[in-house]
Amino acid sequence: MTETAPPSGVVDEVVAAVRDRPDLSVNADLSVTLGGTEIQVTSYTDLVRVEIASVGDAVRVARSARSRSALGRLTRGLVATGLTVDLYVAGAQVARLGTDATPGPLARRLTGASVQYHLGGAVGALVRSL
């Protein structure tokens, strides 16, 4: 399956449609290609695991995002639906987005969104990708 970043209005429409129906549950075991990079997505609850094989692949995916505001729209959608995404790169957890994220002061200042970064995981992913 090949995906491109959705137009900003699509994310906003989904958020509006589910705003009154939080606590969504996701059942998924799939591969998605974004920015030419394969991403593994698995979930059997309200916690979605997204895995990217390497730091280089993660950078390509980030570059394929249309704008910095896309992260804010994504996290608002996750919070509105009661979902959390754990992002793994090279086998290490580098971030948590959405409902169960507990962003620190720096993350709030940088993104203004419900994103919790894991610095140790980011360093581990970088070392594994060398």
Image (tube, grey):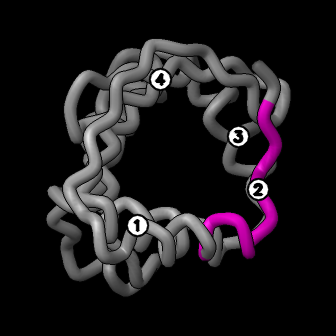
Q: Amino acid at mark 2?
A: Pro
Real-space Cα distance between discs 2 and 1? 17 Å
Q: CA distance from mark 3 to mark 1?
A: 26 Å
Q: Amino acid at mark 3?
A: Val
Instruction: Work out whether mark 3 precedes mark 1 in sequence or the reverse, and give the earlier one.
Output: 1
Q: CA distance from mark 4 to mark 3?
A: 14 Å
Q: Residue at x 62, y 72 (%)?
A: 13
Which residue appears at 51% of the width and 63% of the height? 74
Residue ID for mark 4? 41
Which of label 4 and label 3 is nearer to you? 4
Contact? badges 2 and 1 (CB < 8 Å): no
Was residue 86 drawn as part of the magenta stretch in this picture? no
Q: Residues within 10 Å of mark 2 (few under 14, many from 20)?
A: few
- Residue 43 spot, x, y in % from top left: 32, 24
Badge 2 element? loop
Which of discs 2 and 1 lies nearer the camera? The answer is 1
Residue 86 quadrant: top left
Q: Which residue is mark 3?
A: 61
Instruction: Estimate the spatial distance between the alpha carbons at disc 2 and disc 3, rounded to whole Å.
Output: 14 Å
Q: Nearer the viewer, residue 52 or 18?
A: 18
Q: Earlier in the sequence, mark 2 or mark 3?
A: 2
- Give the magenta range: 3-12
| Residue in the image at 54% along x and 23% along y | 52
> As displayed, is residue 101 above or below residue 89?
below
* Numbered disc total: 4
Q: Position of residue 27 (x, y in %)?
A: 35, 24
Per the rendering, the mark at residue 6 is 2
